[in-house]
Amino acid sequence: REAKHAPSHVAAMIGWLILAAVAIGLIGFRFAVPLFVFLFARFEGRANWLAAMLVALFTWAFVVGYFEFFMKFGMFRGVLFGDMLPLY
């Protein structure tokens, strides 16, 4: 069975992914992932402001708490915060 998706919806999803990749490159995972989750939940998912903020806050707590504190994994900080893009 084949799923049917409107080309405009596919283009919107590709746009969201490009936005996320650019944001990660510029401001890093710590801020880009919660920002992306907030914007996607609010505008694409049509969540209210409070729900979108709460989901973004929990996402930020998970990214920082799990990856940086528990796993001791240094996340990419973004070009604007001094990291270099790993182009290899």
Image (cartoon, rainbow, N blue to C red):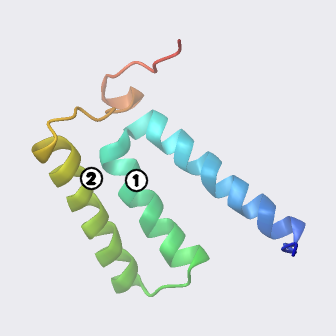
Q: Where's residue 4, x and y in %? A: 87, 75
Specify the amino acid type for callout 1: Val
In the picture provided, is 45 more to the left or to the right than 81? right
- The residue that label 2 is drawn on is 63
Q: Quadrant of the N terminus?
A: bottom right
Rendered view: 26 above or below 31? above
Q: Are the residues flagged by discs 2 and 1 in contact, CB closer than 8 Å?
A: yes
Q: 23 or 88, which lies in front?
A: 88
Comparing 53 with 60, the one in front is 60
Residue most toward the left? 69
Q: Residue furthest front?
A: 1
Count neighbours of disc 1 (C-alpha within 10 A) and say few if under 14, some if 14 to 19, many if 20 or more.
Answer: many
Q: Which mark is residue 5?
A: none
Q: Position of residue 57 (x, y in %)?
A: 26, 68
Vertical relation: 20 (above or below) 46? above
| Residue at image location 49% in from the left, 67% down from the top | 39
- Horizontal side of 4 relative to 66 (left or right) equals right
Res 73 quadrant in image: top left
Image coordinates for residue 82, horizontal then vertical, percent: 31, 22
The amino acid type, in three-letter code, at marker 2 is Val
Which circle's residue, 2 or 1, is located before the other in the chain? 1
Determine the secondary structure under disc 1.
helix
- Left/right of residue 27 with respect to residue 5 in the rendered view: left
Q: Residue furthest top?
A: 88
Task: Where is residue 19? Give x, y as percent.
Answer: 59, 49
The residue singled out by tag 1 in the image is 33
Residue 72 found in image quarter: top left
Q: Classify mark 2: helix, strand or loop.
A: helix
Give the residue at x 47% y 59%: 36
Q: Identify the residue at image location x=46%, y=18%.
A: 86
Residue at horizontal 63%, vertical 57%?
A: 16
